[in-house]
């Protein structure tokens, strides 16, 4: 079953929509949630919560890309859960570091709220498709999937210093691009 058919099931309020979406994208969503939470059981709960959010939001939402839409929902759910669990702890983890790094580029109070805005999101997408595929993939692995630096190094066979430099340069290029696009940073 393709994405459009699954979205139509959601729109028709057919309960098979959730099971079809889960069958198709559960591993992808678990990967994202587990990178944030580092706990398989919590990640599974986040995936279920994200699927419930999809059920509640389609309609009125009509996602063109169901995988991206579910990824966004599971990211938000996992980040909110992580924040709730770590509110008092002041832990400096990979997710904190990822959010801090991207916050340096995007102005405003809450990074996730800013990224949600359609114009900013569109500008970031345009930028990412304008850069080398490897740089784009490393950037997405870090800031969308929340992969650790070590995980990225293993995936691409790069040394840590190369990944760190690539991410820094890509963030700097993104900051410059967003300035040119009229986003005040």
Image (cartoon, helix red, strand yellow):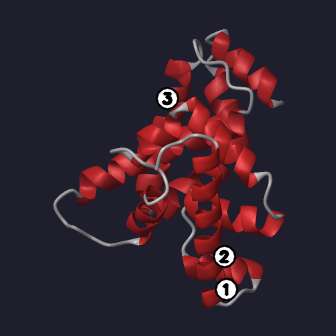
In the picture of the structure, the residue carrying the numbered disc 2 is 166
Q: Judge whether residue 48 can be spotted in this image.
A: no
Residue underneath mark 3: 52
Question: Are there few (<14), some (14-19), or many (20+) residues within 10 Å of tag 3?
Answer: few
Q: CA distance from mark 3 to mark 2?
A: 37 Å
- First along the sequence among labels 3 and 1: 3
Residue hosting label 1: 162
Foreground disc of the pair 3, 1 = 1
- In the image, what residue occupies the spot 26% across and 50% down? 84
**Which residue is at 30% across, 53% downward?**
83
Q: Tell me, yes or no, if residue 25 can be seen here.
A: yes
Establish if 172 lies above or below 103: below
In terms of depth relative to the viewer, which is nearer, 178 or 5?
178
> Few, some or many C-alpha atoms within 10 Å of disc 1 (few <14, some 14-19, many ≥20)?
few
Identify the secondary structure beneath mark 3. Answer: helix
Q: Quadrant of the N terminus?
A: top right
In this rendering, would 172 be left or right of 114? right
Q: CA distance from mark 2 to mark 1?
A: 6 Å
Q: Are marks 2 and 1 in contact (CB under 8 Å)?
A: yes
Which residue is at 75% across, 79% downward? 156
For this view, does 115 lie left or right of residue 5? left
- Towards the viewer: 155 or 2: 155
Instruction: Examine the image and state in which quarter residue 11 appears.
Output: top right
Q: Nearer the viewer, residue 28 or 72?
A: 72
């Amino acid at each position: 079953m393709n994405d459009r058919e699954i979205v139509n099931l959601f729109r028709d309020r057919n309960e098979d929509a959730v099971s079809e979406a889960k069958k198709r994208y559960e591993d992808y969503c678990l990967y994202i949630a587990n990178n944030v939470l580092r706990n398989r059981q919590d990640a599974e709960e986040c995936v279920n919560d994200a699927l419930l959010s999809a059920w509640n939001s389609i309609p009125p939402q009509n996602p063109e890309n169901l995988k991206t839409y579910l990824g966004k929902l599971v990211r938000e759910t996992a980040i909110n859960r992580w924040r709730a669990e770590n509110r008092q702890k002041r832990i400096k983890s990979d997710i904190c570091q990822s959010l801090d790094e991207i916050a340096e580029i995007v102005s405003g109070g809450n990074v996730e709220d800013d990224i949600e805005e359609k114009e900013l999101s569109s500008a970031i997408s345009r930028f990412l498709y304008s850069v080398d595929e490897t740089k784009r993939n490393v950037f997405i692995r870090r800031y969308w999937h929340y992969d650790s630096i070590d995980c990225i190094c293993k995936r691409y066979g790069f040394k840590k210093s190369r990944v760190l430099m690539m991410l820094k340069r890509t963030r700097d290029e993104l900051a410059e691009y967003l300035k040119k696009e009229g986003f005040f940073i």
